[in-house]
Image: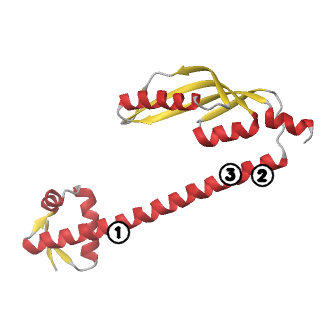
């Protein structure tokens, strides 16, 4: 192994990394970020020189807190592993000014990156399929609920909304679809089975 190859693999790299936790309740976020940093400190191939915590902030109905870490890691391989394992929201390499990465290191990094991207892609596709399945079934349930309600009596959109628990404007979309399919009919403001 040449001197240049050893430099990238064994060089000490100083970085600033920002790690963020988002969630609720507020106490959970406060505790989770501290536990996460304690876990990072157990890693023997990196040293945290300094940690600065932000104040907790509200983001919609969630809470957010981040910590800026000043760290030293051993080599480019460990730096890449740190990024994959601890998922910092940003990282800035401070020292050394130039890093050398060998072909095998770059290949391993790219292959790890591709594997993780494929894994995320699979999860997204699976969640999308599950979401589509749930939407389809929810539509069928709402469709059947409207028909069952109208089998019992004539109802207006407000009454259907109260019975089904679905907002009047959203329910109107389903009612219009059922009207087009000739499954229900509308007389004035009242809906009945066709």
Tell whether label 2 touches label 3 (CB within 8 Å): no
Disc on the earlier residue, 2 or 1: 2
Looking at the image, which residue is at 27% across and 79% down?
A: 181
Q: Nearer the viewer, residue 129 or 77?
A: 77
Alpha carbon separation for disc pair 3 and 2? 9 Å
Instruction: Write down the residue under mark 2.
Output: 107
Q: Residue furthest left?
A: 153
- Label 1 sits on a secondary structure element that is helix
Relative to 7, 80 lies left or right: left
In this rendering, does residue 175 appear at all?
no
Disc on the earlier residue, 1 or 3: 3
Q: Nearer the viewer, residue 82 or 58?
A: 82
Alpha carbon separation for disc pair 1 and 3? 36 Å
> Does 95 appear above or below 134?
above
- Label 2 sits on a secondary structure element that is helix
> Does 74 appear above or below 151?
above
Relative to 7, 118 lies left or right: left
Disc on the earlier residue, 3 or 2: 2
| Residue 105, x across and y down, in percent | 78, 46
> Does 161 appear above or below 46?
below
Alpha carbon separation for disc pair 2 and 1? 43 Å
Instruction: Write down the residue under mark 1.
Output: 136
| Residue 91, x across and y down, in percent | 66, 33
Q: Quadrant of the C terminus?
A: bottom left
| Residue 31, x across and y down, in percent | 42, 28
Q: Quadrant of residue 7?
A: top right
| Residue 163, x across and y down, in percent | 13, 60
Instruction: Write down the residue under mark 3.
Output: 112
Relative to 38, 134 lies left or right: left
Front label number (2 vs 1): 2
Q: Nearer the viewer, residue 42 or 150?
A: 42
Q: How many residues crowd mark 3 within 10 Å: few (<14), some (14–19), many (20+)?
A: some
């Amino acid at each position: 192994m040449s001197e240049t190859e050893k430099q990238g693999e064994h060089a000490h790299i100083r970085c600033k990394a920002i790690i963020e936790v988002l969630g609720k309740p507020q106490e959970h976020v406060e505790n989770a970020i501290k536990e996460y940093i304690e876990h990072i400190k157990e890693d023997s191939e990196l040293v945290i020189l300094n940690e600065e915590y932000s104040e907790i902030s509200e983001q919609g109905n969630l809470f957010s807190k981040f910590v800026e870490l000043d760290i030293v890691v051993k080599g480019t391989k460990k730096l890449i592993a740190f990024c994959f394992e601890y998922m910092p929201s940003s990282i800035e390499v401070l020292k050394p000014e130039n890093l050398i990465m060998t072909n095998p290191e770059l290949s391993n990094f790219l292959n790890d990156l591709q594997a993780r991207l494929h894994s995320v892609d699979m999860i997204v596709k699976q969640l999308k399929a599950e979401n589509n399945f749930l939407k389809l079934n929810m539509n069928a349930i709402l469709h059947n609920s409207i028909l069952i309600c109208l089998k019992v009596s004539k109802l207006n959109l407000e009454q259907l909304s109260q019975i089904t628990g679905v907002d009047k404007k959203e329910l109107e979309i389903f009612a219009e679809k059922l009207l087009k399919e000739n499954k229900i009919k509308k007389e004035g403001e009242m809906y009945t089975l066709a």
